[in-house]
Image: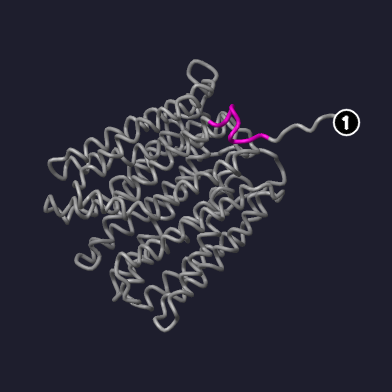
Amino acid sequence: MPARSSSPSLFSRDHLPLAIGAVALVTLGAFENRAVGTALPTLVREFDAVSSFGLATAAPIATYVVSLALAGLWADRSGPVPPLRAGAVTFAVAQVLVGTAAGMPQVIAGRLLSGLAEGLIDVGIMVLIARALPEALRPRMFSLFAAAWVLPSVVGPFLTGIVTEGVGWRWVFLGALAVLVPVWLLLRPALRTVPPSAGAAGAPVPGGASRSVLPWAFVAAASVFGLSLAGEHLSAETVPAVAIVVLGAAGTVLAAVRLLPRGTFRVRRGLPAVVAQRAFAGAAFGAVGSWLPLLLTLVHGFSPTTAGVSLSITGVTWAVGSWLQGRDHGRPPAVVLRAGLATMTAGLAVTTLLAWPAVPTVIGLLGWALAGLGMGLTSPVLSLLILAGSDRTNQGRNVSAGQLAGSLSTAAALAVSGAAVALTTPGPATFAGILVAGGVVALGGLLTAGRVVDDRTTAVEADVAPVG
């Protein structure tokens, strides 16, 4: 009888450097993400620039959109290593700018670069996984990524608060810079194993994508930037703010039509449906999660700290869901996706009970934990489906399209829900509307989940609409 071949392992000699380095990089990014939210209020107060808080928050969102488009093209032409290197350098410069800032202009510049770095790293690390890991190990890698967010989500704000109060907010940013060096050293061995893209100029980009994608990415960035800022001024300057919201929403939709694969808005079978599921999940889960701390504070009387701690359990359940999808369960990705979306939809339905003060808060929070479990099942499966439907010539653009869909849909959902909060007296009725809308969007994803499988072909190629 022939000897049974051993199954591949992330912790083998061939794959361990990538597993350690990639998880370390994701963990650093997660800590930076959580730390900024805690340190930024102190920063703007010190500079007497509270009015610039929205600008400092919106700046990286806009550059992230442009960076995703740029990184997708770059990774397809030159492989994942150049975008990753550029992302690490840009991240370092961003931390130095903010950590040594003498005023808000320098802070804003650093925040703009932070968004640019995040997009380069997000796309680069995904393409690196596609190039360096066999398909059987990718689910386990994504489960490790989810686990890498747990510690930063639970203790990140607490540690940031200690640093901010003890030695000052500047060391929140400069400390991240110090951690970047060992993290990059951990990742370097894995980068050496990735062969460069074929050809002197890398893989060609078809359909005029290189000429059309970046201009429309700037349109999307400007639209998202406008949406992010307009919501803050709806109650004080209603007419101009509403105009900006309408224009921003129109610009976001128009740019999305040009940036995402053809058929995404129709949930066409194959890759367009996978990208559409990213949009459904982002709008449903991201928008609801953004408003829950305010809901708990206004409707249930939670302190800000208690509201944040109560919601941190979602990071744990998300990691559990991702761990479950990474096991050798033998189910097709489409089946796991349906299970995740069904769990998230049910969880959001229960979470809606938080809008009623008479209902015990723990019931609604259990629903939110269930929604986190569903998102943990859903998100990595969508990444797997995108990579499975890609080849070396379009991996970067396909990954970028998925990330763009999630970012743009979340921004649009936040703008609409923000307008509802700004134009009404935030209370049970307003929050109930937001939570119900999130559940309906998740249900839309569940009802169309079967379309991620293209019965006519085994590989789906990105088909981004050209301009002109």
Colour setting: one colour
Quarter occupied by residue 309: bottom left
Residue carrying label 1: 1
> Main SS type for the magenta part?
loop
Q: Is residue 334 left or right of residue 23?
A: right
Tell me where residue 218 appears, x and y as whole percent. Answer: 34, 41
The magenta stretch spans residue 88: no
The magenta stretch spans residue 10: yes
Tell me where residue 69 appears, x and y as whole percent. Answer: 42, 37
Question: What span is in magenta?
Answer: 8-16
* Total numbered badges shown on the rendered structure: 1
Tell me where residue 300 appears, x and y as whole percent. Answer: 35, 76
**Quarter that holds the C terminus:** top left
**Quarter that holds the N terminus:** top right
Tell me where residue 156 appears, x and y as whole percent. Answer: 35, 51
Residue drawn at point x = 12 percent, y = 50 percent: 47
Q: Residue furthest top?
A: 200
Residue drawn at point x = 49 percent, y = 35 percent: 20
Query: In what element is the residue under mark 1?
Result: loop
Give above or below for 454 relative to 280. above
In this view, the residue in front, 457 or 44, is 44
